[in-house]
Image (cartoon, coloured by chain):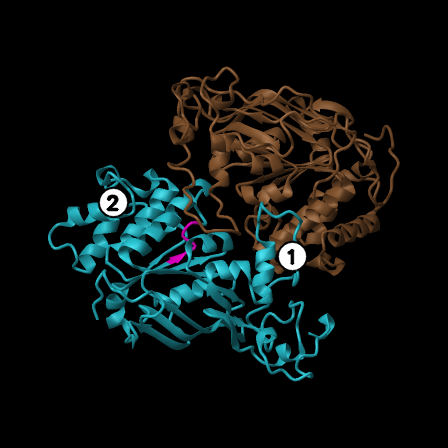
Amino acid sequence: MSAAVAPVTAGGGPVNGPLHLGDPVLEIRGLCVDYGVGEDAVHAVVDASLTLRRGQVLGLAGESGSGKSTLAYAATRLLREPGVITGGEVLFHSRPNAQSGPNAVTGTADLLDLDEGELQRVRWSEISVVMQSALNALNPVASIGHQITDVLRAHRPDLNRAGRTNRAIELLEMVGITGDRLSSYPHELSGGMRQRAMIAMALALEPQVVIMDEPTTALDVVTQREILEELIRLRDDLGFAALFITHDLSLLIELADEIAVMYAGRLVERAPSESLFRAPRHPYTHGLLNSFPPMHGERVAMTGITGSPPDLRAIPSGCAFHPRCLHAMDRCSVDEPQLVPLSHGPVPAGRSPREVACWLHDPRSAVPVPEELAQPDPAGPAPDAPAAQQQEGTS
Amino acid sequence: MTETLTDPVAPGTAVPVLEARDLTKHFHVRRGRSRSTVHAVENVSLALPRASVTAVVGESGSGKSTLARMLARIITPTSGQLLLDGKETPTGQRHRQEYAGRVQLVLQDPFASLNPVHSIRYHLTRPLKIHHLADGDLDGAMESLLRRVALDPPARFIDKYPHELSGGQRQRVAIARALAVRPDVLLADEPVSMLDVSIRLGVLNLLADLREKSRLAILYVTHDIASARYLADKIVVMYAGELVESAPSAELTDSPAHPYTQLLLSAAPDPARAEPPSLAGRGTPPSLVSPPSGCRFHPRCPHAMAVCREQRPPSVTVSSGHTAACWLHASDLSPAQAKPIAKEAR
């Protein structure tokens, strides 16, 4: 409990430098999640692999039922019954900072192997979660200040009462809420302020990873924009990595450094935001992008994607998207495509190679890639400039 | 007054099917012994011409849903007039059904607006029977309704229950039910916001189709300005219960005249944007119990002048068909009126 006492800065600013930006902090490998067991089990997430890097905002996009929230909750071991993790590993490469407190976990750990005690030390202090509905996630009968100091009391035994209060005020001000709101109850705050308070709480211990599940979906666009600006500023200051889950792909393209797209429990494409927007490779990504009417230019009729997302109890054979796909081939209804790198060129340090799960891009495929799925990638097919030591925030 | 499908008059010039004049709604609320009034909608005038889509865009609490419900006569306006084909509609319960036969409302959540214990057949039978429209051939009428909303073949859907359908299909059933009474006006309150992204366009395209083929006057209430631009012929923007700007949709999004519309557009997600936007007029909408004096946007407005605090802005014509309720576009302001006011003084 009280072995190595880390240096303590009561209410201090960010301690971590930009040293490790771009290094993997959370690696999800082959994660499989079922709801229920046995024959009737629904495969909500199938063989998902993702790498979250320090200082990066990784967007996870998908429609309802695509498994995006399940993936995040499984990776943080917050998954509830009847959800069962049936395979994979979630490697957390921890490099705690001073705000983590004396009990911080160091080194690499598989979150799926940790026991409750170890999990407790990781949760919130190193990996925190911001839920969609702040009204449900906040305790309605406790003041905001009480809820923030509660976190500090549990994880920061080195802080006394006054220290906790000071830190709580500092956190609220960090997200743009005045310190006098400390004694407010959740119902006394607007939706936007509640969501800001949630973010303040998630950042209370300066975690290395913040997972956000539709944090701004219930908010109006102006408030949403303000909170996202705040989030990016905090990311730049504190250097945490964020996994941002939303159905709003148009928002993610502006916000995230890299985007992973999920469909029917599978990751179907992963690419830097700009590449994904300008040069999607998966027909589903292309269809999804074409489901958001543009804000400029000629108004033209758009079609979106025909059909609707599949029922997870009856996933189509082969590629789950093939019944809705305009380019489906015979093979698509038989073999399931795997998420594989698109090019085999060198990848700059601190980046992951671009990946897609689609037979159209199989080098052995005789069918030419449709034009709309072969637009030139703004990042280049085989990016040069190797060994860029740090990846700057692209906000 | 009967209109034929070959009506040569262009939309906009004819008498609108439904017109609202100075609609106002004040909700009286009581909390304990204190009474207060929520000024939900204030003096909104709006015309819905045949064969056109008018979008109402606003944030939550802007009064856009209250407006739609007043147009559907679910909420009785505090003051103002509703004109159907240019004639004032008789009030009172007796005329309700007659009005509902002309003006139909489709709600946001098809889970809530369809009864889970009844089949699609039941949902479509009800309006046909109540309005005596089936002429003996109920099944035929229902089948053609389902075809109109692209639920084809109808036999596959007619005996299903709401939970057996996807969200998009459910919303199509809700639209089919509204179409059953052969209305002239369709009021759609956030019809796609609960649906999955990939199927939203399908429902929007269905509304566009109903505008073209059935020449319906459609009101599309939404918070999503990009979808309003896609579907609507005209967009009106509401802020804190007031109508602040109205223009043809491409013009409104390309050259917004009201500072609030500019703020909304800068905050909306836009993947094609190169630089992060700068928001002018941050903050949240005011309390509608004691709304700000003058222009309700003035406490947030980056261009607020002395006059904005004192007088309600007039509706100023910026260009043909484009109006903005903003003093910035008024011509004859005195220097004292046009004096900028500091943020703290508002």
Residue A141 is covered by the magenta coloring = no
Shown in brown, the chain is A
Image-based side of B344 in relation to A63, left or right: right
What's the mark number on residue A365? none
Residue A199 in the image: state x and y as whole percent.
Answer: 68, 47
The quadrant the C terminus of chain A occupies is top right
Residue behind mark 1? A185
Q: Which residue is drawn at 40% across and 77% down?
A: B80
The magenta-colored residue range is B188-192
Disc 2 marks which amino acid?
Arg
Image-based side of A210 in relation to A48, left or right: right
Residue B50 in the image: state x and y as whole percent.
Answer: 31, 64
B73 shown above or below B271: below
**Does the rendering let one see residue A263?**
no
| Depth order, front residue of A349/A147 | A349
Residue behind mark 2? B147
